[in-house]
Image: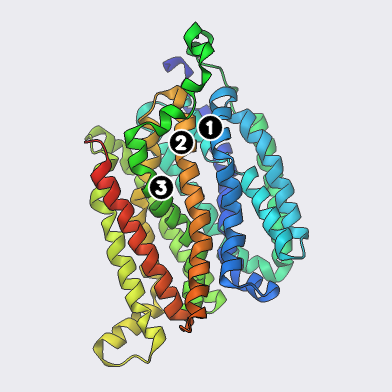
Amino acid sequence: MSSTFLPKRQAIVVFIAFAFAYFLSTLIRAITATLSPTLTLELGLQARDLGLLAGGYFLGFAAMQLPMGKWLDAYGPKRVILSLLPIALLGSVAFAMSDNFYGLLIARIFTGIGVSACLMAPLTGYRRWLEPSQQQRANAWMLMTGSLGMLASTLPVQWLMPMVGWRGVFLVLSVLILLAIVALYAIAPAWQSPASHHQETDSTKTKPADTGYSQVWANAYFRSLVPIGFLAYGGLIALQTLWVTPWMIKVAGYSPAQAASGLFGINLTMLFTFWLWGAINPWLVKHKIHSDTLLLRGFPASFVILTIIIIAAQAANKPATGQFGNIFSLLQQHIWILWALYFVTCSFTALTQPAIALAFPPQLAGRAMSAYNLTMFLGVFVLQWSLGLLIDFFKYLGYAEPRAFQGAFVAYLLCVIGSYVYFAVKRPK
């Protein structure tokens, strides 16, 4: 296997090419958070509509995960990503040209399909191109690049909007997607099938399903992480790419510009967080500190912080009185800092991706990560839409909007705690 490792300089160039594509995919993923006030006003969207529109990206993304895993193992990262990115290009152009909700939703779904390989393609490649000690670092820095894309979806998009409008923003993104296609075509390494693929036994040839997803879903460790992936990791993305902005506007009373600034601060924090994970991962590997240990000890801090955020929303429901009222009011004014801390503590869930990959042999790594991504991005879609439905439901019952947000997020918090308990109990010891 060592002969397949890329020289350092080539590995850096390949990383940059794939990272640029992933940067664009996360920018497009998160842009609905910044555009949500504009789209809500222009199209008259309810919370459930906004959740469905944002979640459409993840529905398309999730739908591709299982077939993409097989394609990655069979055809390699370059061929798969270059086959899918043109669909994202068409989806981005269609979004810019659509004039109704359903046109935007369909375009959003196709965009999600088109960028669905932007993370899994390089992660599958890194299993063969990089030494094992460098794979978790590369994974963390890919996530850091994703945070950079989310960062670009905040204030830069807010600044660009008065000049070109939201439709112009998507046309600019279309041009950048085209550049990514050209770069990957020129730079990404060809994929050589492992020798084991050429030396199949008669038994393997007669039972191809044995090398499919059955081995992945039968793995006890994989199954123990499914609720975490669906609810916790999926929830991290669902909130960061949509619901944190409406919370800042509807609950904390931020203006759209203030919310964009807060989201910029949140995503800048996450950029640094994933950079830090990449920097310390070799040390963690050297000292044999397993990702499960970090997840079990670090992730519960997010429960405490989200509880504080929910309680602090009381300041939006009634005038601040007394010492606690003043504290709640102060927390609401700087709520983006609490949200940033919440997402930092949720980043422990990102360690599950490389842990899943390392739990399987290289020939199953693509399928294992794609199956996990299916649960994760299906979770994003379900959570983005269901949170919107819950908010509208509580409003229908007569609750004020801040109270409706509180109720929806309490339900979400309880589900996430349940996923953590399930992992703690069910994971193989």
State yes or no: discs 1 and 2 in contact (Cβ < 8 Å): yes
Place of residue 171 in the rendered image (x, y in percent of width and height, measured from the top left): 74, 55
The amino acid at mark 2 is: Met
Packing grade of label 3 (10 A; few <14, some 14-19, many >=20) is many
Relative side of 44 to 393, left or right:
right
Q: Is residue 179 left or right of residue 372?
A: right
Which numbered disc, 2 or 3, marks the residue that appears first in the sequence? Answer: 3
Q: CA distance from mark 1 to mark 2?
A: 7 Å
Residue at image point 58% right, 28% down: 71
Percent x, y for residue 271?
A: 44, 54
Say if 368 sits above or below 144 in the image: above
Say if residue 232 shows up in the picture. Answer: yes
- Which element carries disc 3, helix, strand or loop? helix
287 on left or right of 221: left
Q: Which residue is mark 3?
A: 229
Residue 369, numbered label: 2
Q: Residue at x 33, y 41 (%)?
A: 224
Which quadrant of the structure image shows residue 157?
Answer: bottom right
The label number, if any, that marks residue 69 in the structure image: 1
User: Label 2: few (<14), some or many (≥20) within 10 Å?
Assistant: many
SS for dot 2: helix
